Image (tube, helix red, strand yellow):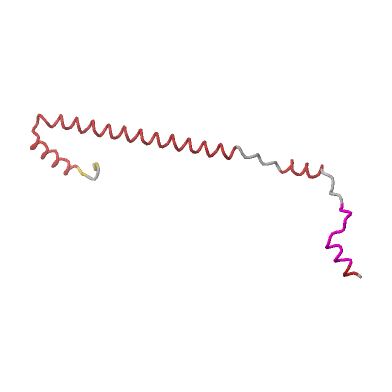
C-alpha cells in the first residue's frame, strides 16, 4: 500500500506521532478536517477539469464552424460534366506577338 509515496510503516509512524502530539480526543477531529480539505480539493480539481473540457469543446466547435463556412468541394463527376457541357474556346482572330515572330522566322 503506497499513498503519495508514503508506505504503510511510515503511515503508522506518522499516526503514532500525531496521537502523541494531539491526544486521542483531538485526533478524530483533525482527521475529519483533513478529509474535508482533501474532498474540497478533489471537487475543485474536478470542477477545473470540467471547465477546461468545456472550453476545449467550445473552441473545437468554433474551429469546425469556420471550416464549415467554406464552400463545399465539387465532386469529380460534377466537374467532368460541367467541363463536357462547355463549348470549346473560340480562336482569337487577332494574331499575337508570338505568331508574328513565327511568321518572321519562316520568311
Question: Which residue is drawn at the image coordinates 56% and 36% (left, top)?
Answer: 65
Q: State the residue in front, 9 or 102.
A: 102
Residue 43 in picture, x, y percent from top left: 31, 32
Corner quadrant of residue 36: top left
Residue 49 in picture, x, y percent from top left: 38, 36
In the rendered view, tell whether residue 18 sits above or below residue 94. above
The magenta segment is 91-103
Residue 22 in picture, x, y percent from top left: 9, 34
Q: State the residue in front, 26 or 98.
A: 98
Corner quadrant of residue 17: top left
Question: Which residue is drawn at the image coordinates 85% and 66% (left, top)?
Answer: 101
Task: Tell me: 107 left or right of 1.
Answer: right
In the rendered view, tell whether residue 34 sits above or below residue 92. above
Corner quadrant of residue 84: top right
Does the magenta-highlighted stretch encompass residue 35? no
Does the magenta-highlighted stretch encompass residue 100? yes
Q: State the residue in front, 34 or 55.
A: 55
Q: Quadrant of the N terminus?
A: top left
Q: Quadrant of the C terminus?
A: bottom right
Question: Which residue is drawn at the image coordinates 20% and 44% (left, top)?
Answer: 7
Task: Tell me: 35 left or right of 56.
Answer: left
Amino acid at each position: 500500500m503506497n499513498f503519495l509515496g508514503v508506505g504503510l510503516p511510515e503511515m503508522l509512524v506518522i499516526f503514532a506521532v500525531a496521537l502523541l502530539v494531539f491526544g486521542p480526543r483531538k485526533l478524530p477531529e483533525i482527521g475529519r478536517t483533513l478529509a474535508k480539505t482533501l474532498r474540497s480539493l478533489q471537487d475543485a480539481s474536478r470542477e477545473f477539469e470540467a471547465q477546461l473540457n468545456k472550453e476545449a469543446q467550445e473552441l473545437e466547435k468554433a474551429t469546425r464552424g469556420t471550416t464549415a463556412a467554406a464552400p463545399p468541394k465539387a465532386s469529380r463527376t460534377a466537374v467532368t460534366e460541367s467541363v463536357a457541357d462547355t463549348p470549346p474556346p473560340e480562336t482569337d482572330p487577332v494574331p499575337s506577338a508570338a505568331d508574328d515572330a513565327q511568321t518572321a522566322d519562316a520568311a
